[in-house]
Image: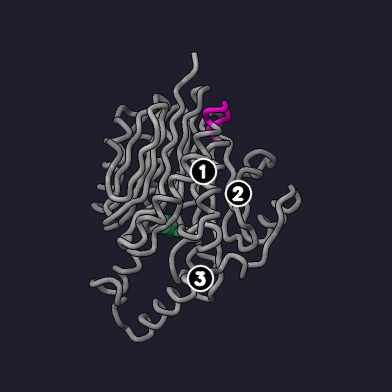
Amino acid sequence: MTTKPVLLIHGGAWAMPDQEIAAHERGIANALAAGYSLLEQGATAVDAVEAAVAVMEDDETFDAGRGSFLTQDGRVQMDALLMDGSNLRTGGVACVERLRNPIRAARLVLDKSPHVYFVGTGAERFARQHGMLLCENMDLVVRREQERLYKAQAAELAGLPDETFSGNLEAAIKLQSHDTVGAVALDQYGNISAGTSTGGTLNKAPGRVGDSSLIGCGCYADNLSAAVSLTGWGEPIMKLVLGKWAVDRVAAGATPAEAAQAAIDYLFGRLGGYGGIILLGPDGQVGLAHNTPRMAWGLQTPNGPQLGVTRNPG
Ligand code: ASP
């Protein structure tokens, strides 16, 4: 008997302005279509997650691949993780600057390396040795992000709150810069997978790694529990190892919806963190929660696609 495939994806959770909603919905729809068509053709959950995430990396709307937020020195520096819940094989890359699709490099690590995690130039060299093309860092930088960086740095220098947010600068950075992408999938063979890809946070120090690509923090998958991808303010998510925390709740009997909400409550209650989470159990049940004003998500099952920016799947 085959399992009914499920694909659940996100494109960040933050105070997304109204004028950005349409682009996010378009990007989510394209990623869902790419990932789900593979599942329908019998591809694995890992294939579907990789494909959906790569589509969002290619879309400048999101903070992943080209269009990522910039570091303090104006460069794109990206992190990604991909995990196969059927055997716990995992591939991660961090601080890569010359790859258009870090999730594809993560896939190569998962498939071809005895190691789990590569950083910086070592990660780029590994990807190149396995057939990926390197680009220039400037190929990944977009004008919109240069302007956003100048504004954030000018506000920081002047000690002023960011004008696009009514709170203080610290709150603006916490709430505004979370456009990371991620996906969780269940394939017809009953296996689950998770992937997360990010350019990190706006104005981050060079070399900073967030939660997204750290195993058990921004991403995790195990057929014996659940698949998870997170977005949001990375440091608190890392301190709580929140992805693993959430899937362990599913293994202990919580539904993915309950575990997702509990994880976000824990993130805020324990450390005042903000973010969003998607969870998928091996039985196809899903969960999604966020405590940011908005979250971009999409869900596809044999009943068809649903997507939105503010609502939870229902
Ligand atoms: N969690 C990511 C990070 O801290 C940022 C995000 O989700 O947008 O690197």
**Which picture quadrant has residue 20?**
bottom left
Q: Amino acid at mark 2?
A: Tyr
In the image, what residue occupies the spot 31% across and 69% down? Answer: 172
Q: Nearer the viewer, mark 2 or mark 3?
A: 3
Residue 14 has which mark?
A: none
Say if the magenta span includes residue 41. Answer: yes
Residue 52 has which mark?
A: 1
Q: Which residue is mark 2?
A: 117
Side of 86 relative to 107 (left or right): left
In the image, what residue occupies the spot 32% across and 37% down? Answer: 287
Q: Amino acid at mark 1?
A: Ala
Q: Which residue is most to the top?
A: 1
Q: Nearer the viewer, mark 1 or mark 3?
A: 1
* Position in image of residue 225 (x %, y %): 41, 30
In the image, what residue occupies the spot 37% across and 46% down? Answer: 297
On the question of residue 236 being in view, the answer is: no
Per the rendered image, the range of residues in magenta is 39-45
Q: Residues within 10 Å of mark 2 (few under 14, many from 20)?
A: many
Residue 71 has which mark?
A: 3
Residue at disc 1, CB closer than 8 Å to ligand 1: no
Query: Could you tell me how far apart the alpha carbons at marks 1 and 2 are, in whole angstroms?
Result: 21 Å
* Position in image of residue 191 (x %, y %): 50, 27
